[in-house]
Amino acid sequence: MNEFVVTTLLIVALFALLGSGVWIGLTLAGVAWIGMELFSSRPAGDAMALTIWGSASSWTLTALPLFVWMGEILFRTKLSESMFKGLAPWVNALPGRLLHTNILGSTIFAAVSGSSAATCATIGKMTIPELTRRGYPPEKIVGSLGGASTLGLLIPPSIIMIVYGVAAEVSIAKLFVAGVIPGVLLAALFSGSIIVWALMNPGKVPSADASLSFGEKLREARHLIPVVLLIGSVIGAIYSGIATATEAAAIGVVGSLILSASQGSLNWVSFRDSLLGATRLYCMIALILAGAAFLTLSMGYIGLPRHLAEWVGGLGLTPGMLLIALAVFYIVLGCFLDGISMIVLTMGVILPTVTAAGIDLIWFGIFIVIVVEMAQITPPVGFNLFVLQGMTKREITWIAVACLPYFLIMVVAVLLLYWFPGLVTWMPSKM
C-alpha cells in the first residue's frame, strides 16, 4: 500500500485514540500494533512483549526516576524561600531589581528539578505574591517567570534529556554537560532583556530595598550554599567522569535527603509524598517510552522512517533549512502535546533524516530541548501557561502575550547555537 495512505491511516488512528481519552502510552502501543498487524508480516504480539520489556528494563533509564525523586524531595523543602533570601540582596543594584529573582531562582531550581512545570510552580509560589506586593508590573512578573521556568528542561539534570538520550542512543552524561553553557546563555539573555526594559522604563521599577553591606550580603547568601553544593556535586561527578548519570542521580537523591533533613523538612509524610509523587510521574513517563519503543519498531517494519528520510533527502534541503522546518514542526506539535510525548513520538522517524544530514546528535538534542521549551509557553497547550493561569487566575491569552518576548529570546538563542555550535559541543568534547 502507498506510504502516504499508511501514514494517513496511522495518524488518524493516533488522534482518534488520543481524542477519546486513552492514555498516551497505550495510544502509541495501540497504533504500533495496528500498523504491524495490518501492514507488515511480523507477528505483533511477541514483538510488543519483547520491545516493551527491553525499554522498561534499560539500565540507562534508571537515572530518570532518581532525578525525578530528587526534584520531588527538594520541592517539599524550604528551598524556594531560602533562594529568595539569598538572591534578593545581590540583584537590588541591577536595573529591574527583584525581577531577576525569577530568572536566577528558576536557573538554580532547574538544576535540581529537571521539570519546567515544577520550576514554574515552585518559584512562582514564592515570587509572584512578593513581587506583586512590592508593585512590579504583573506582565513582567508573569512573563519573566514563564520564560525562565522553561530552563527546567535545559539545565541538567533534565528529565527530557534522559528521554532523548535513550531514544537517540547518545550519552546522557554528555547531553547533560552540553546543556550547561546554553542554559547559562539563555538565563543571561533573559536577565539582559529585563535590564534593557528597566533602563527604558525606569518609572515602572519600584524603589530598591535598603542596601546591605558586602558582609551582610554574604550572610544572606548562606541560604544558597547547600543547594549550590548539591548542584555542583551532581554535575561535577558527571563531568569529571567519577560517576555515570545514574550514579550521579543517586548522589543527588542522598544529597537532597540530607539537605531536607538539615532544614527540618524531612519527615515521614514528606518522604512518602515525594516517593509517591516520583513513582506516579515515572510510571507515566515509562508507559509513554514503552509505547514509543514499540511504535518505533512498528514504523521500522513498515518502512516509514526510511521512506520519509528518502523523501526529505530528495527535497535537497540544507541542514539549516531542515532545522528551520523541524523547529516550526515541533513548535506546532507543542501546541497539542507535552515535551516528552513530542520527543518519543517523533524520534524514530526524525533521527534517520537528521543523521543523514550530518547533524551532530548531541547538538540536535539541545536544539530540540530549546524548541520544546518554546512550546511550553505557546497556546493553546503550553504547560507553563496553565501553571501560571492556576497561580494568577489571569486569561491564558494575557499570559501568552506576557511570555511572548521570552519566546523570541529563545529563537535568538537557537540562532546563536546554530552560528556557534561550539557553545554546545565544547564541554562534552573535553569530558
Image (cartoon, rainbow, N blue to C red):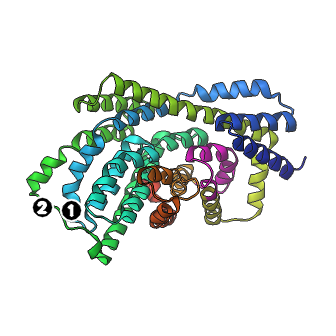
Dot 2 or dot 1, earlier in sequence: 1
For residue 233, side relative to residue 399 (left or right): left
Whether label 2 touches label 1, CB < 8 Å: yes
**Residue projecting furthest to the bottom:** 200
Q: Which mark is residue 296?
A: none
In depth, the one of 296 and 141 nearer the eye is: 141
* Image: 89 above or below 288: below
Q: Amino acid at mark 2?
A: Ser
Q: Which mark is residue 92?
A: 1
Q: Residue at x 40, y 46 (%)?
A: 121
Q: Residue at x 36, y 38 (%)?
A: 75
Residue 372 within the segment the image draws in magenta: no
In depth, the one of 108 and 21 nearer the eye is: 21
Label 1's element? loop
Q: Amino acid at mark 1?
A: Asn
Q: Main secondary structure of the magenta part?
A: helix
Q: Is residue 109 visible?
A: yes
For residue 294, side relative to residue 397 (left or right): right
- Tell me where residue 288 appears, x and y as whole percent: 62, 36
* Image: 397 above or below 295: below
- Marks 2/1: CA–CA distance: 8 Å
Q: Residue at x 34, y 72 (%)?
A: 197
For residue 195, side relative to residue 23 (left or right): left
Which residue is labeled 2 in the image? 211
- Tell me where residue 20 appears, x and y as whole percent: 72, 41
* Image: 188 above or below 149: below
Segment tinted magenta in the rendering = 332-359
- Tell me where residue 96 appears, x and y as whole percent: 28, 67
Quadrant for residue 198, please give it.
Answer: bottom left
Q: Quadrant of the C terminus?
A: top left
